Amino acid sequence: MNTPLINSIKSIDDFRRIPEGQLNELAAEIRGFLVEKVSQTGGHLASNLGVVELTIALHRAFDTPEDKIVFDVGHQTYVNKIITGRSGEFDTLRKKDGLSGFPKRADGPFDVFNTGHSSTSVSAALGLLRAMGHKGQGGRVTAVIGDGALTGGMAFEALNDAGESGLPLIVILNDNEMSISKNVGALTRHLNDMRSSHGYLSFKRSLSDFLGRIPKIGSRIRVRLSGLKSRIKYFLLPNVLFEELGFTYIGPIDGHDIHKLTETITLAKNMEEPVLLHVITQKGRGYGPAEKEPGRFHGIGPFDPVTGTEPPKNTESNSVAAGRAICELAEKEKDITVITAAMRSGTGMEEFSERFPDRFFDVGIAEQHAVTMAAGLAAGGMKPVVAIYSSFLQRAYDQILHDVALQRLPVVFAVDRAGLVGADGETHQGVYDIAYTLTMPYVDIYSPASKGELGEMLAIAIEKGNPAVVRYGRGALPDTEYPPVEYGKWLELKPVSDITVIATGRMVDIGKRAAEGRNIGLVNARTIRPMDEEMLRRIGARARRIITIEDGIASGGFGSRIAERFSGSIKVTRLGVPDTPVQQASPHEQDVICGMDEESLIREINLAAEEII
């Protein structure tokens, strides 16, 4: 692909030397470049196509990196990386030791704050602004947050604090929902042009000051006019919420008009107060398949850039398998409900939402609310299932403990993307849920080794009526047929021996391959809690060395509980994820990095054999 403008950008200064008349040409180049590169590596495409002009305008209006731009979630920062001179690294996007798909402070000054989860940008930006003020540093700080991220309660907490502070924080609301089009019209444009002009803002302040100086009656007139103004706002303007939070609202404006964006952002930059700039963008803009299916192109694997089609999947994903199993259970049990936090498709719950719309609740990016609402449903006699990614569930730790576990309410957490997740890197690794849920009372933890076990465990968890976690990884568990799952019982795949491997979840398959042809015991630990006491007694009576392997952190996880159990009697080697965050790579590469692949397990088996000779 011919990209002369992109090729000329080796630094932010090179970008700023591009004439304004060529910026639309640059935007077109960037879109073509993104489609070509992401089609090869996979990644977040639709969101990046939607912010091309906005990112260009931000770097034209601000003196970055002295001025700081914090991107919420972070999956829309590919354009930021191109503009700041990193286009040459895109062949390594999301690969081991390559370019991250998210902002990473270690990558340089234009990645201001690491973000992989939602609704954090305003808080981080306000903290940066306060730090700069304390240190006497100049510069502006801007938070770029999407309308989806704005559904998170943390965003409103931050907006409330920022508005009260009176500091010149700029929040850009990147709104890509088509329903907002009703706010775009002649009256809205007129009111917003008027309100965002220097003349209007100056007049508003001058009038208030003038009335305040009139003896006796001035303050009363000012109060009356303020009340009248508020009533007019409630009837006419879409900005009331932000104004009441203390922000001067500007917008909505076209998020694909570089000139207008740059002009308006510059205006906001020169205002000494909190400002919220509302821009309307289109996810997937400029690439037909992504415009038609922005959800599918949000996070996508390699695809054909001409047609937008992906290679056929050879097997059913764990997410789809879980969704199908819950649908089958819901046919028989009318009290089953499903709650998800803006992840209906990602967690495989689309079919459930269509078949049982009155029992499906998507609460937006609000994990804490999702968990406590599920607790309320359970207290009311329902059987709620919270379908959620592992790394997102950790945002609701307190709600799981306080609102579910301590009350022993029958909420089942269908924990998707548990364990190592590959190219999304450290912010998305679902490796902590075993360790932190093991600290909570009454919570059962199920760990299926096959799709069949996944379905059975969901059924048992719902029927049992305890707080429960059913955890399964990204991708697809094998279709291996095992004997039926029994609550609290493990499965002896090879008889307990001098060296016995206890594996859980997807690591069972690795354990089976490593154990092949070797005289060792192998146990499928189907439940992390409760543990199989009878099996543990047999292992304690026979084994001389135990090796545990789990798709979670080794410290404080499943293996740690086994080590505590046999402390002083049997040596336990724990294989799992180390305390050091695991960077982006393929899932197999990450297994190797963590020493929990087949070869690493064989090596530990051989070392154990040498020790007991």
Image: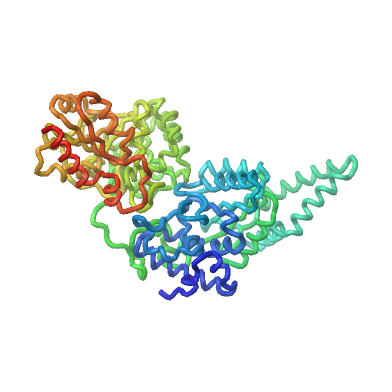
Q: Tell me the residue at 33%/67% (across/down).
A: 304
For this rendering, which residue is in front, 130 or 78? Answer: 130
Q: Tell me the residue at 85%/47% (across/down).
A: 211
Apparent side of residue 144 relative to residue 481 in the rendered image (left or right): right
Apparent side of residue 487 relative to residue 495 in the rendered image (left or right): right
Q: Position of residue 484 (x, y in %)?
A: 18, 36
Count of marks placed on residues: 0
Q: Is residue 10 visible?
A: yes
For this rendering, which residue is in front, 141 or 389? Answer: 141
For this rendering, which residue is in front, 280 or 21? Answer: 21
Q: Is residue 85 above or below residue 249?
A: below
Apparent side of residue 144 relative to residue 100 in the rendered image (left or right): right
Q: Tell me the residue at 74%/55% (across/down).
A: 201
Q: Is residue 208 above or below residue 267?
A: above
Q: Tell me the residue at 65%/60% (across/down).
A: 266
Q: Quadrant of the C terminus?
A: top left
For this rendering, which residue is in front, 25 or 412? Answer: 25
User: Toward which corner of the image does residue 511 lie, by quadrant?
Assistant: top left
Q: Position of residue 69 (x, y in %)?
A: 56, 54
Q: Position of residue 20 (x, y in %)?
A: 59, 72
Colouring method of the image:
rainbow
Q: Position of residue 378 (x, y in %)?
A: 40, 31
User: Toward which corner of the image does residue 191 lie, by quadrant?
Assistant: bottom right
User: Toward which corner of the image does residue 362 lie, by quadrant?
Assistant: top left
Q: Quadrant of the N terminus?
A: bottom left
Q: Is residue 336 visible?
A: no
Of all residues, the one furthest to the right in this rendering is 215
